[in-house]
Amino acid sequence: MRIFFIGPRASGKTTLARSLAQALGGRWLDTDAMAQQHAGCSIADLVSARGWEAFRDLESAVLAQAAAMPATAAAPLLVATGGGMVLRPENRRIMRQAGLVLWLNAPGELITARLAAHLEPGQRPSLTGDDPVAEAARVAASRESLYREASHAALDAAQPVAKLARQARQCINDHFSGSTPL
């Protein structure tokens, strides 16, 4: 089984994917990390050199690769996606068809607080030219309908990771009810 985590930057997608993979005996991956590996440079450098469209093309290719990776109930694959993965209708379709899509719904103040505390220069270029922290909440709000459309269920990203993981496991069990419970 494949579980895709969607949501804005700093919503906890990678943290939750890593935590659940360990608990479930599966593996996890991060599509942004995969894209950087394929590009041979940071996302910021890729966008600077080739533009956002080139990054979105690579992001879609990486998602298709992840969606084709083997996964079973005994060895699930947990995929943390980039915040903009939902921008393309094809990406939303691929995730929904390939597995369960869980949206980590994070309020704007949580996103800005997390980004301010852990801002990594060069991690991701600005979409609007604004300060990344100021921009993040606005971008998340503008994508909310896409996250909602793409997801099978929403989780409150403001919860502690342990509680979030329990809720995610319940969603996984409910979605894959014909499988062995996790």
Image (cartoon, rainbow, N blue to C red):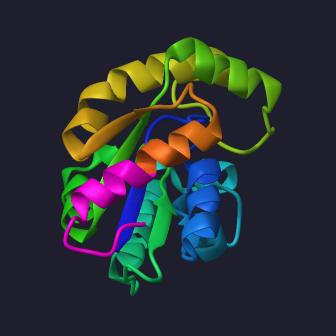
- Tell me which residue sits at (39%, 62%) in the image: 3
Q: Determine whether, in the image, residue 98 is placed left or right of residue 140.
A: left
Residue 176 falls within the magenta-colored stretch? yes
Where 156 falls versus 125 (above or below)?
A: above
- Residue that extends furthest to the front in the rendered view of this protein: 181
Q: Is residue 163 above or below residue 143?
A: below
Q: Nearer the viewer, residue 147 or 19?
A: 19
For the N terminus, the quadrant is bottom left
Residue 127 percent across, percent down from the top left: 52, 31
Residue nearest the observer in this picture, 138 or 52: 138
Residue in view at x 46 percent, y 73 percent: 77
Tell me what residue is drawn at x 34 percent, y 58 percent. Answer: 172
Residue range highlighted in magenta? 169-182
The answer to whether residue 165 is above or below residue 74 is above
The answer to whether 98 appears left or right of 104 in the picture is: left
Residue 173, compared with residue 165, is above or below; it is below
Q: Confirm whether the magenta stretch covers residue 83.
A: no
Q: Is residue 13 left or right of residue 180?
A: right
| Residue 136, image x, y percentages | 56, 23
Q: Measured from the top left, where is residue 91 in percent x and y?
A: 27, 58
